[in-house]
Amino acid sequence: MDGLGNPLCFILTGGQVHDSRAAEPLLRQLALAGVNLIADKAYGTKELRQYIEAEGGQYTIPPKSNAQDKWDCDYYVYCERHLIENYFNQLKNYRRIATRYDKLAHVFLQTIYIASILIWLK
């Protein structure tokens, strides 16, 4: 998402795949230099944080409560994460996406692209 809540790119994964597994391949599609990435606790793996720093970016990811090496997190910046939640809420207003009528993954992804364009145009 950009600062206005518009998606920049998508990766479709299986229902049994955790989101953090697709995070690094998704971030490879973006230029992270000078970017502050905001994500929730599930994305706070050491490998992902190191990747963001190696690409010249910063992250605002709160540590899990059971993390051994805790890091600082700016919770005022973290509050902007609501833009992501708002986008997915708008996306689920499209019945075809919310109920997953499409059987093929590439058709479902194309439906998400079309719905995203319609959301941008509003």
Image (cartoon, rainbow, N blue to C red):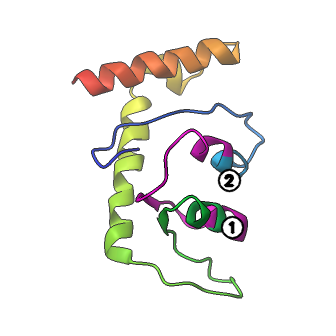
Identify residue for label 1.
45
User: Spatial distance from mark 1 to mark 2, Cα to Cα?
Assistant: 8 Å
Q: Magenta region: which residues?
A: 25-49
Residue at 51 percent across and 69 percent down: it is: 61
Q: Is residue 54 left or right of residue 68?
A: left
Q: Is residue 101 visible?
A: no
Contact, CB < 8 Å: mark 1 with mark 2?
yes
**SS at circle 1:** loop
The quadrant of the image that shows the N terminus is top left
* x and y, in percent, of residue 99 in the image: 56, 23
Up-down relation of residue 99 to residue 18 (above or below) = above
Q: Is residue 3 visible?
A: yes
| Residue 94 included in the magenta stretch of the image | no
* x and y, in percent, of residue 44 in the image: 62, 68
* x and y, in percent, of residue 76 in the image: 31, 74
Up-down relation of residue 29 to residue 19 (above or below) = above
Sequence-wise, which precedes: disc 1 or disc 2? 2
Q: Is residue 70 left or right of residue 103?
A: left
> Label 2 amino acid?
Ser
Up-down relation of residue 103 to residue 85 (above or below) = above
| Residue 43 included in the magenta stretch of the image | yes
Residue 82: quarter of image: bottom left
Figure disc tally = 2
Question: Could you say which disc has been placed on residue 20 in the image?
Answer: 2
**SS at circle 2:** helix
> Label 1 amino acid?
Thr
Mark 1 surroundings within 10 Å by alpha-carbon count, few (fewer than 14), some (14 through 19), many (20 or more): some
Residue 119: quarter of image: top left
